[in-house]
């Protein structure tokens, strides 16, 4: 089976619906046909300030949300990034073959550093995409299923891998991003021009997987739309409604066309009510399962340990290959 790698940051208590639609839904189907590695990337999360106790807790919670959403920890390798030392080790080597200008062109760095201010912007945040390249390359990954916001980072990974191979001889598999076109980017309900994010300053427009159903429904009912009134998919002129239709269609497994037909001549209120039902209907059972899993943290930790050992056995071999190629003297 072809290798697949993807991950999410434990940067909040809950995942948001963009993570679910843009990543988890695809992971779930791809794990059947791929040798899949799904990581909880805590080393990425600390590129912006995290509360240590919360980070630990959010790491377990993220693992529980993977499992509750349908990732099978027996069939796939579901592990915590910092449990496999090779990630940080390979990242250092890749840092040394990445151009400063090349890394400076990453738009996510520009966005996140603008929010952090110059004192909050760390070298770690700048180096984040290079750590991500290490994540992917350690597993001889062929497929990287991510949302649109990660496309540039996967492109950088390809460039770094190809450069390393040219300079030091064939070492890494050059991976491909796998991005689901229609659902690749879910927008904030209060600001339908900006990406929904776990680390958004305001939570008013973020749908959390683990929110109470009544909270989710309220947020959807308050979503920004427009004065036009028609339930029509028009990303350019009606970004709010287009976003609601995208979420609705993927969560319900229906075409946008069938939703436009159903809600033709009815108001946005009806559309939002229908959407709220579908979202809470999907997230309700996931939430219940997460609560169950978190009730037995020892069992969850045991599962993560077994999976980390499996990941390390692959990653350590790749790291040894890379160290050897660049001329690091092996210890005896
Ligand atoms: P943070 O704000 O901490 O960066 P995030 O919500 O952007 O959190 P990540 O952990 O960075 O989430 O990304 C996890 C996965 O979810 C990635 O594959 C990313 O492409 C995808 N993703 C994140 N936000 C969206 C979104 N709004 N629409 C679709 N996919 C998304
Ligand atoms: Mg992100």
Image (cartoon, rainbow, N blue to C red):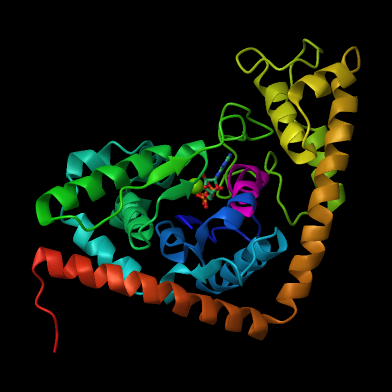
Question: Measured along the vertical axis of the image, is residue 169 above or below residue 77?
Answer: above
**Residue 203, image x, y percentages:** 66, 45
Q: Nearer the viewer, residue 319 or 272?
A: 319
Give the image location of residue 298, x and y in percent: 65, 85
Count of marks, rendered view: 0
Can you say whether 174 is above or below 269 in the image? below
Q: At x 59% / y 84%, what residue is drawn?
A: 302
Tell me where residue 45 appears, x and y as whole percent: 46, 60
Q: Residue at x 90, y 12 (%)?
A: 265
Please identify the quarter of the rendering in which residue 111 is found. Answer: top left
Left or right relative to 75: residue 173: left
Q: Is residue 332 above or below residue 65?
A: below
Q: What predominant SS class does the magenta segment belong to?
A: helix
Relative depth, front residue between 234 and 35: 35
Please state the horizontal and vertical placement of residue 320, each as a whole percent of the image: 23, 72
Q: Which residue appears at 63% of the width and 30% of the height?
A: 191
Is residue 305 in view?
A: yes
Q: Is residue 316 left or right of residue 33?
A: left
The residue nearer to you, when weighing 186 against 156, is: 156
Residue drawn at the location 33% of the way across and 57% of the way down: 137
**Region in magenta:** 17-28
Q: Is residue 192 above or below residue 166?
A: above
**Taking 225 as reference, is 42 left or right?**
left
Residue 215 visible, this angle: no
Q: Residue furthest bottom?
A: 332
Residue 62: in magenta span: no
């Amino acid at each position: 089976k072809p290798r697949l790698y993807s991950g999410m940051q434990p940067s909040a208590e809950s995942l948001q619906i963009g993570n679910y639609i843009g990543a988890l839904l695809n992971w779930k189907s791809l794990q059947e046909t791929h040798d899949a590695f799904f990581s909880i990337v805590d080393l990425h999360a600390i590129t912006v300030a995290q509360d240590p106790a919360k980070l630990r807790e959010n790491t377990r919670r993220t693992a529980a949300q993977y499992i509750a959403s349908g990732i099978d920890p027996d069939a796939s390798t579901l592990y915590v990034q910092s449990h496999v030392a090779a990630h940080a080790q390979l990242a250092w080597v890749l840092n040394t073959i990445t151009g400063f200008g090349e890394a400076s062109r990453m738009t996510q760095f520009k966005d996140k550093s603008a929010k952090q201010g110059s004192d909050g912007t760390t070298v770690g945040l700048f180096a984040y995409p290079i750590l991500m390249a290490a994540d992917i390359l350690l597993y001889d990954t062929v497929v990287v299923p991510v949302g649109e916001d990660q496309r540039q980072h996967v492109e950088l990974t390809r460039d770094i891998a190809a450069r390393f191979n040219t300079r030091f001889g064939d070492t890494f598999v050059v991976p491909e991003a796998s991005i689901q076109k229609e659902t690749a980017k879910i927008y904030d309900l209060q600001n339908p021009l900006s990406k929904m994010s776990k680390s958004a300053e305001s939570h008013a427009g973020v749908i959390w997987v683990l929110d109470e159903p009544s909270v989710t429904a309220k947020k959807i009912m308050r979503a920004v739309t427009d004065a036009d009134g028609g339930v029509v998919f028009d990303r350019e002129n009606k970004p709010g409604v287009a976003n609601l239709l995208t979420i609705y269609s993927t969560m319900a497994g229906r075409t946008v066309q069938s939703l436009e037909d159903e809600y033709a001549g009815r108001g946005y209120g009806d559309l939002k009510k229908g959407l709220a039902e579908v979202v809470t209907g999907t997230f309700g059972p996931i939430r219940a399962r997460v609560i169950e899993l978190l009730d037995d943290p020892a069992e969850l930790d045991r599962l993560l340990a077994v999976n980390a050992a499996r990941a390390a056995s692959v990653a350590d071999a790749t790291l040894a290959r890379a160290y050897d190629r660049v001329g690091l003297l092996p210890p005896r």
